[in-house]
Image (cartoon, rainbow, N blue to C red):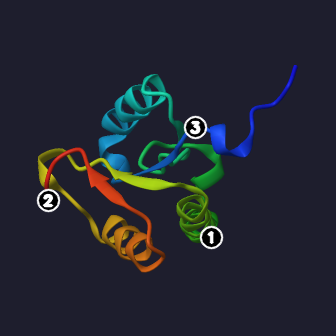
Amino acid sequence: MQQPAASERPAVVVLCGSTTYWDELAEAAVYETAAGRIVLAPCCNMKVPHPLWSDSQQADRLKQVLGTLHLRKIDMADEVLVVNPGGYIGASTAGEIDYAHSIGKPVRYTEQP
């Protein structure tokens, strides 16, 4: 099977938003995928209990790792989609938006802030 040329690669979109809206993030991923885009998204919902973040020290370390990984996802993406039900944008998401703007990534929103 022949691989498509790099210019034929689908757009890559990274989802940003509060994991409080986990279901909305998942729904946005479905729509973006159906539109033919490659989706990068948060993969750990630390608001739901899990053995990987049950210990508070381990959770703090993981939050740092996940924050850095998400910035690298922004680096890899062609654009950012902010999932912001009711216009909500928390501090972490605001920082991700600022970072995306600083490196010239286009940012769009599910709802205008």
Q: Is residue 42 left or right of residue 106?
A: right
Residue 89: where, in percent of width, then height? 23, 61
Which class describes the residues within 10 Å of circle 3: few (<14), some (14-19), or many (20+)? few
Which class describes the residues within 10 Å of circle 2: few (<14), some (14-19), or many (20+)? few
Mark 2 lies on residue: 113
In this view, 48 is above or below 30: below
Mark 3 lies on residue: 10
State the mark number for residue 61: 1
Between 7 and 73, the residue placed more toward the observer is: 7
Residue 27: where, in percent of width, then height? 36, 29
Between 94 and 81, the residue placed more toward the observer is: 81
Q: Find residue 72 and report its image quarter.
A: bottom right
Q: Find residue 51 and report its image quarter.
A: top right
Picture mark count: 3
Rounded to the nearest whole Å, what is the CA distance between mark 3 and mark 2?
27 Å
Between 67 and 33, the residue placed more toward the observer is: 33
Rounded to the nearest whole Å, what is the CA distance between mark 1 and mark 3?
33 Å
Residue type at tag 1: Arg
